[in-house]
Image (cartoon, helix red, strand yellow):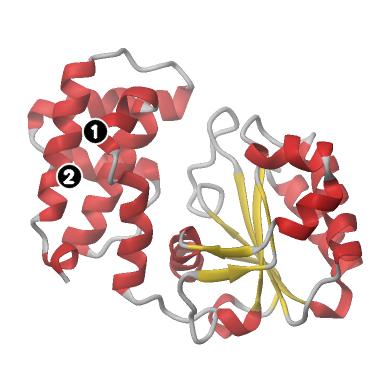
Amino acid sequence: MTGYEKLAEEFVQGSKNILGSSLVGVYLHGSAAMGCFRQEKSDIDFLVVVGNDISDEKKKQYMDMVVELNKKAPAKGIELSIVKEKVCTPFVYPTPFELHFSNAHLAWYLSNPKEYVEKMKGTDKDLAAHFMITYHRGKTLYGKEIKEVFSEIDSTYYFDSIWSDIECAGEDILDNPMYITLNLCRVAAYVKENLILSKKEGGEWGLSNVPHRYSSLILAALEEYASGKEMPCDAALEQEYAEYMLEQIRRLPVFMS
C-alpha cells in the first residue's frame, strides 16, 4: 500500500460507522487522486457527501475519529469537507459545507470542540475547485459513483475559485515559492487550454509553455515538490515570474467574462 491507502480505508470505515445511512459517498481528490502524492509535501484530501443534516453530537464523534487518524497522516495531514448531496447537483456556489477540517484548524478543535462543531460550517469558494478535480480526476472510495453525485462545474465558478488562490501571487510567492510557482502554471494551463492539472503536472506544462527565462524556477519548484529539497531563493526572479504569469492570465477571455 502507498502512504495514504491504509489511512483512506480507515477513514472510510470511520465515516460509515458514524454517519450510517446518511453517508452518500467518500471521494478522494487532490494529489493522491492524481498520482503525485508526496509523503513530505502532500495532504490527503477527502470530500464526504451526506444526504441529511448531521447533529453536533455526530460531528463531535466524527471529528474525534478524524483527529485520531490525523496522527497517522503525512505532515500536512488530512483535509476534508462534508457537504450535502443537494448542493452537488445542481452545483451551488459558493458551496455550503456542513463540517471542515485541516491541520490549520486542529488547535481550535482541541481547545474548544463544542465551539468548533457549532461554528465550522458555512460556504467555501474553494469547494468549486475541489468539486472540479473530483469530477474529472477524483476517486470513489465508497458509495455512489462520482458522476452520480457531482455535476460539471461552470468555468466561471471554477476560475473564480482558483483565481482567489493566486491573485496575490506577487507577494505570496516570497513566502511559499514552490506552491505559488506550480499553482500559477496550473491556473494558466486551465485558462489557456482547459486542462485540470495537479501542481506537478502544472509545472511540467509550464516548462513547455512558459518563457525559458523562468524554466530554472519551475524546475526548482518541481524538485522541491518531488524530493522535499527546498528550492533556492531568488526573490527578484520569483516576483518577476509571478507578475508575468498574472498578467498573462488577466489577458485571457475567462478573466474578462
Distance CA(mark 1)–CA(mark 2): 8 Å
Q: Position of residue 237 (x, y in %)?
A: 16, 21
Indicate the secondary structure of the residue bearing disc 2: helix
Q: Residue at x 67, y 62 (%)?
A: 121
Location of residue 70 by image quarter: top right
- For image coordinates 35% across by 52% down, the residue present is 164
Up the image or down, 29 lies above or below 134; here it is: above
- 169 or 188, nearer to the observer: 169
Q: Position of residue 126 (x, y in %)?
A: 47, 58
Q: Is residue 160 left or right of residue 234?
A: right
Disc 2 crowd rating (10 Å Cα; few below 14, some 14-19, many 20+) is: some
Element carrying mark 1: helix
Q: Which residue is disc 1 drawn over?
A: 170
Q: Earlier in the sequence, mark 1 or mark 2?
A: 1
In the depicted structure, whether residue 147 falls above or below residue 102: below
Residue 244 showing in the rendered view: yes
Q: Total of numbered circles in the picture? A: 2
Query: Along the horizontal axis of the image, is 102 left or right of 128?
Result: right
Q: Determine if residue 2 is in view.
A: no
Q: Amino acid at mark 1?
A: Gly
Q: Position of residue 28 (x, y in %)?
A: 61, 59
**What residue sits 77% from the left and 46% below the top?**
6
Determine which of the numbered discs, if any, sits on residue 199 in the image: none
Q: Quadrant of residue 75?
A: top right
Three-letter residue code for mark 2: Leu
